[in-house]
Amino acid sequence: MKRRNFLKGTALLTALGLGGGTAAMAISSSRNRYYGGPASDHFDGTRFFNPGGTPPSGFSDLLKWQFGGTRAKWPEQVPVAASKPAALADDLTITMVGHATMLIQMAGVNILTDPVWSDRASPLAFAGPKRVAAPGIAFADLPRIDAILLSHNHYDHLDLTTLASLHAAHAPQIITPLGNDAIIRSTIPDAKITVGDWGHVTPFGPLSVHFEPCHHWSARGMGDRSMALWAAFVIAGPAGKVLHIGDTGFDQGRPYRDLAARHGPIRAAILPIGAYEPRWFMRGQHQNPAEAVEGFLMSGAAHAIGHHWGTFQLTDEAREAPLVALNAALSARQIAPNRFRPLAPGDVWAIPAA
């Protein structure tokens, strides 16, 4: 039984890019398969890293978690009231699809974040985290999609099957950090892709998209750890500014410290609040709800959306645990719950003016 559970867990972690650790590093090629460029304060010539930050947990910690962890039981399926969005929005409306996938409609532009419509967040059709909540927007009900913000290459964020379907139906511009373009072009050679490093700014119609640092890592398997970059985004336009973080560890607040100084008022911050237990293993890569609240305050954002919860079971906490923890953290900091809302699939929020 233990061996079967371990193999199941290892398959899960490999699918997420969470497995590997020191063993993966030992068998990794010294040559970066996705990106070639000069060394920087977050790229050593082969791999990207978080300056001054904690590296991902290693293989021995993975074994400790798999043999000693206590995983809460999730439901196999939860009801979803799907939405059919408007063709566009002149101001700012955000609709939750599920996990880290949201439709951001602002200034007449339709943007998807980390789109995943597949049943599993996995390289395998028969194994890996299975969706318990159907997408909050049916694929056929999507409006014209102009752009995709792709934060990093873990399977719960970069789903090549979904990207290929979106390319065939909408041919959107994909905006993503360094190295992820090579992964996308392996399946979609003619995809329209803009790549950027931390600090880069790319214009898109009436908007500008800023690539921001966050504390994470990347992998698609056992031999490519941190060979493609991860990033957060700030979208600036006539309706204000939106911060989107697909995944991050809190890292002593570093992903948030300078945002207000660099960008001024932020109308909405889209922040991950799930996949955080056990803390000793997940702390360096996934913030918990209390840390998300601290980041929200540090960013100076007027409103926040909690995502990365309730669709795929990636870690040990119960499905509803992030909601309970978020409410407690907001109450402790005397923040009105309507300022920081954890959206469920199908929820729509016309963000109030700041």
Image (tube, helix red, strand yellow):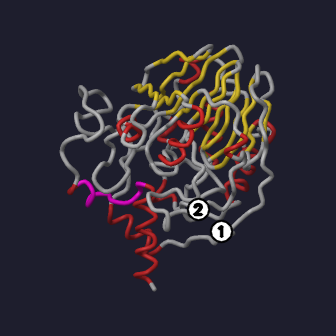
Q: Position of residue 111 (x, y in %)?
A: 62, 30
Q: Considering only vertical position in the picture, is 126 above or below 22?
A: below
The residue beneath circle 1 is: 74
Task: Tell me the distance, in whole angstroms, between the alpha carbons under discs 1 and 2.
Answer: 7 Å
Q: Which residue is found at the position 70% from the left and 28% from the top?
A: 105
* Quadrant in which residue 215 is drawn: top left
The residue beneath circle 2 is: 313
Q: Which residue is found at the position 67% from the left and 27% from the top?
A: 301
> What element does badge 1 sit on?
loop
Q: Is residue 219 left or right of residue 353?
A: left
Q: Given contact means CB atoms under 8 Å apart, are the residues at marks 1 and 2 in contact?
A: yes
Q: Position of residue 160 (x, y in %)?
A: 47, 46
Q: Position of residue 142 (x, y in %)?
A: 70, 38
**Labels in figure, total:** 2
Is disc 2 surrounded by few (<14), some (14 to 19) or many (20+) residues within 10 Å? many
* Quadrant in which residue 194 is drawn: top left
Screen quadrant of the C terminus = top right
Q: Considering only vertical position in the picture, is 316 above or below 195?
A: below
Q: Which residue is found at the position 54% from the left and 33% from the top?
A: 149
Kind of residue at badge 2: Gln
**Residue span colored magenta:** 17-25
First in sequence, mark 1 or 2: give its number: 1
Toward the left, the furthest residue is: 30
Query: In terms of depth relative to the viewer, which is nearer, 281 or 346?
Result: 346
Q: Is residue 13 left or right of residue 267?
A: left
Is disc 1 surrounded by few (<14), some (14 to 19) or many (20+) residues within 10 Å? some
> What element does badge 2 sit on?
loop
